[in-house]
Image: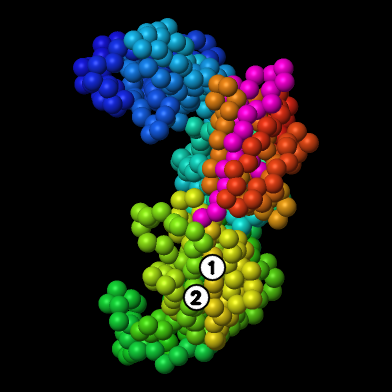
């Protein structure tokens, strides 16, 4: 392989050296058949502070070469988009691999990177007659946590072709859920009105995620024949009207939908699918004066939130209601109520470092379709969030100062830290927030006994009331001597785990922590403390048993 001089100069410049002479070179080959992997991106990272790196693309024989390297410890890995990855010293995508120690002027050549191909899932989407469904959205979903609750998020999306086929590639090993959603129901019209709907479904036929069967994907596996057979369901009508609409003038926004022939604005009405998939969609229409009626026509069976909002100058009115379309529905009445102005105080305990941007206190709806509302604290910590519609909200502070944690948040007398809370119409309570700079550090060394502590994955998992909150999980990789360092830890009770040569990412969740519970070490972490820990090494095969696909 010929190396352009610009690549060599870039590698040397990346590591801040004028005339280093070290060399790291080798080849990337397929772990299954030893065939070379061409056009893979190889990344060489000098481990230090700050970390610096250089990249190279493999040639026709899978070879790569980095020259002009200073002495130090390096991480070496390769990747090819949607095809797979390789980590030096690792036999699977979940292993931490080995570092490379390079002496002054040393040449480490002939290194082999074993390329682990990503998994794939493929199949068809058919309707109830066995005909293909083109342009159906197929989503590969993965479980995560939102406010401690288990939810599904979109990991890889795709669409079926004109034969109803789909294929999703570039999948890491793990447990997933497959969801198919048809894009159109034009074939089920009568007099222009839908009478039936081809309903979305999870793989296996379930309509709700709680009933869906998981799909366990192993490293490099190609799952074929993952077919959907969607059912036709009765179309459900959702219609109603808006009550309590104030006397509205024409919209000050020229792009807004203003009723022709007279004053008055349309009220924005949204029908949002209530589900455990964050960000799943909905429908939006306008309710026009004078009667402010709305009609969503035919929608699939499901649980929905109907939300109505209208603005007049700097004032907002809103209403919301949960409904189940499978139940008999009469006319839905949404009674608008005025929004509230929220004021409060943000206090920081300790000295915060300079922030890249000002702090903001943000209120968010879970449905992912409503706009966030924010207020910026002044020099004295006071802030105001204007015109917050009544309903359920979640409070956050962004960006949290480096080395801090959210210590408390109270709306009136209610603890609202990491939980939904209700803001009612009418006089608002005060929102008081405390941020502490008193995060802790955990230093330690793996107790390996007869095992190998080099490059062990370290997982710090909260216990007690914080156990289900993903933000309190920490991960690190031990060095070649089994030593590790974790910073920015909120005070509390934890268990710490040391995983033999396994990366911590897939273990930073309550399910894995529960599976490994008896193998962890309990530690108490005080505010601002530096805690020393010596977790016992968990053998690789035992640790793998905590992963969902290994428990099936």
Q: Quadrant of residue 261?
A: bottom left
Q: 24 or 222, which is in the foreground?
A: 24
Picture layout, residue 139 above or below residue 113? below
Within 10 Å of disc 1 (Cα), the crowding (few <14, some 14-19, many 20+) is many
The residue indicated by pointer 2 is 344
Within 10 Å of disc 2 (Cα), the crowding (few <14, some 14-19, many 20+) is many
Q: Magenta includes 40?
A: no
Magenta region, residue range: 437-461
Asked if the residues shown at circle 2 and circle 1 are in contact, with their CB atoms under 8 angstroms apart, the answer is yes
Residue 425 visible here: yes
Q: 450 or 529, which is in the foreground?
A: 529
Picture layout, residue 163 above or below residue 432? above
- What residue is at 50 percent from the left and 41 percent from the top? 156
Q: Magenta includes 460?
A: yes
Where is the N terminus found, in terms of image quarters?
top left
Picture layout, residue 50 above or below residue 298? above
Q: Quadrant of residue 515?
A: top right
Compute the Cα span from label 2 to label 1: 8 Å
Q: Position of residue 165 (x, y in %)?
A: 51, 37
- What residue is at 50 percent from the left and 32 percent from the top? 169
The residue indicated by pointer 1 is 433
């Amino acid at each position: 392989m010929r190396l352009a001089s610009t690549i060599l100069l870039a590698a040397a410049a990346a590591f801040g050296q004028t005339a280093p002479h070290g060399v790291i070179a080798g080849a990337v080959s397929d772990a299954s058949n030893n065939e070379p992997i061409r056009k893979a991106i190889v990344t060489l990272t000098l481990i230090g502070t700050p970390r610096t790196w250089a990249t190279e693309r493999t040639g026709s024989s899978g070879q790569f070469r980095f020259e002009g390297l200073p002495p130090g410890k390096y991480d070496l890995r390769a990747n090819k988009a949607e095809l797979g990855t390789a980590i030096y010293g690792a036999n699977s995508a979940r292993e931490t691999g080995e570092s490379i120690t390079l002496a002054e002027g040393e040449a480490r050549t002939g290194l082999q990177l074993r390329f682990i191909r990503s998994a794939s899932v493929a199949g068809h989407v058919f309707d109830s007659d066995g005909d293909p469904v083109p342009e159906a959205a197929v989503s590969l979903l993965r479980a995560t946590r939102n406010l401690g609750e288990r939810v599904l998020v979109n990991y890889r999306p795709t669409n079926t072709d004109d034969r109803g086929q789909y294929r999703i590639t570039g999948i890491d090993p793990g447990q997933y859920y497959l969801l198919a959603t048809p894009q159109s129901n034009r074939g089920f019209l009568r007099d222009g009105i839908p009478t039936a709907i081809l309903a979305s479904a999870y793989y296996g036929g379930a309509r709700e995620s709680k009933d869906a069967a998981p799909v366990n994907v192993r490293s490099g596996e190609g799952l074929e024949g993952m077919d959907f057979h969607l059912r036709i369901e009765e179309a459900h009508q959702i219609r109603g009207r808006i009550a309590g609409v104030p006397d509205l003038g024409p919209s000050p926004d020229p792009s807004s939908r203003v009723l022709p022939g007279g004053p008055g604005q349309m009220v924005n009405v949204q029908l949002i699918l209530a589900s455990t998939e964050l960000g799943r969609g909905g429908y939006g229409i306008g309710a026009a004066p004078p009667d402010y009626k709305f009609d969503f026509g035919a929608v699939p069976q499901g649980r929905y939130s109907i939300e109505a909002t209208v603005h007049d100058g700097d004032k907002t009115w809103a209403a919301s209601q949960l409904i189940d379309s499978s139940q008999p529905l009469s006319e839905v009445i949404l009674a608008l109520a005025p929004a509230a102005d929220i004021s409060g105080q943000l206090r920081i305990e300790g000295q915060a470092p300079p922030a890249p941007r000002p702090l903001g206190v943000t209120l968010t709806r879970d449905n992912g379709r409503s706009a966030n509302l924010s207020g910026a604290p002044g020099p004295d910590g006071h802030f105001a969030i204007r015109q917050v519609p009544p309903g359920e909200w979640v409070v956050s502070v962004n960006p949290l100062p480096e080395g801090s944690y959210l210590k408390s948040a109270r709306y009136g007398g209610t603890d609202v830290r990491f939980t939904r809370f209700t803001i009612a119409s009418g006089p608002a309570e005060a929102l008081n927030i405390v941020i502490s700079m008193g995060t802790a550090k955990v230093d330690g060394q793996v107790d390996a006994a007869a095992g190998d502590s080099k490059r062990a994955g370290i997982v710090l998992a909260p216990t007690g009331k914080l156990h289900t909150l993903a933000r309190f999980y920490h991960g690190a990789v031990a060095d070649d001597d089994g030593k590790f360092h974790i910073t920015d830890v909120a005070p509390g009770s934890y268990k710490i785990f040391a995983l033999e040569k396994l990366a911590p990412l897939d273990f930073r969740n309550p399910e894995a922590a529960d599976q490994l519970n008896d193998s962890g070490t309990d530690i108490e972490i005080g505010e601002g403390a530096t805690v020393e820990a010596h977790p016992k090494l968990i053998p690789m095969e035992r640790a793998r048993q905590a992963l969902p696909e290994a428990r099936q």
